[in-house]
Image: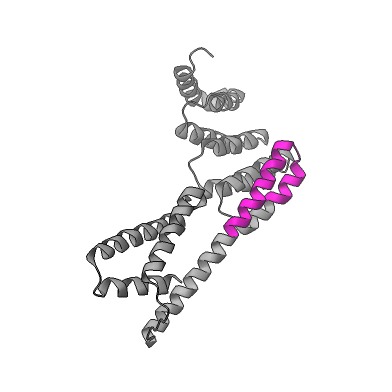
Amino acid sequence: FLFLFFNLFLKFIRSDVDSDEKVFLITTVSSVSSMLVDNLLNVSMHFSVPGLLFFWLLGSVSLKIGTKNIYIEFKKMIKFIALLIFAFFIYIIVVWFSQFMREVYYFKGFKEMRRGNYVEAVLELEKAYKFNSKDVNNNYELGNAYTKLDDTKKAIFMYKKAIDANAGYDEIYFNLGVIEKKNMMNDDAIKNFRTSLWINPMNEKSYYAIAEIMLQSPAKYIQDLEIVMSDGIKIHRYN
């Protein structure tokens, strides 16, 4: 469809038609193209108003450039390019189908987590993970679910997968540090608590957690302990 759409658009622009119509079509097709690109990178067309505007513009252009009898000469190179475009859009369909199914199972699992049904949540979130293993929200929530079930190994694995997907969330590092601290993986826990603080220096729980670990072996961490507690006092001077 898009191949035919843009092909007819170019033919229309090159034809001897009124310049005002050309300006209208160029502006409209530019809007349609930008929304297509934005939707591949963002979520603009997931909302009703942008979606309505997109299909209204698409219909307006199609009505203007459409003809009853269409003849396109397909040379070998054109056939090859058309095949590549077709394969690309098949790929896009598969990707977005996977994304859609991930959303379905993720929100099912999310609701089960809020209801306290952790076993059911794991089942739904694992289904979402199979459709998209690189989604930070699902990986993080699945890590939380495994933590609730005391499955330490899987929880750590999923928190690390969440970090691989997006390393910008301080709560992921904090939760990973908590479970490592609980299992006496103190050096790893301190590293993750420090990263959490680097992202969000206002997270007072990270200061407490680091201090608790270091106070267990003050001789080992004496210099770092003083720095951590001094920094914590600067942020939370009344605690």
Answer above or below: position of 15 versus 146: below
Tell me if 103 is positioned left or right of 196 in this view.
Answer: right
Tell me which segment is drawn in magenta.
98-125
Answer above or below: position of 11 versus 172: below
Q: Main secondary structure of the magenta part?
A: helix
Residue at 44 percent across and 56 percent down: it is: 54
Colour scheme used in the picture? one colour
Quadrant (top left, top right, bottom left, bottom right) of the C terminus: top right
Q: Nearer the viewer, residue 178 or 97?
A: 97
Whole-percent x, y for residue 193 in the image: 54, 33
Determine which quarter of the picture holds residue 150.
top right
Whole-percent x, y for residue 44 in the image: 46, 50
Determine which quarter of the picture holds residue 215.
top right
Residue at 38 percent across and 65 percent down: it is: 61
Whole-percent x, y for residue 209 in the image: 58, 27
Whole-percent x, y for residue 11 in the image: 31, 75
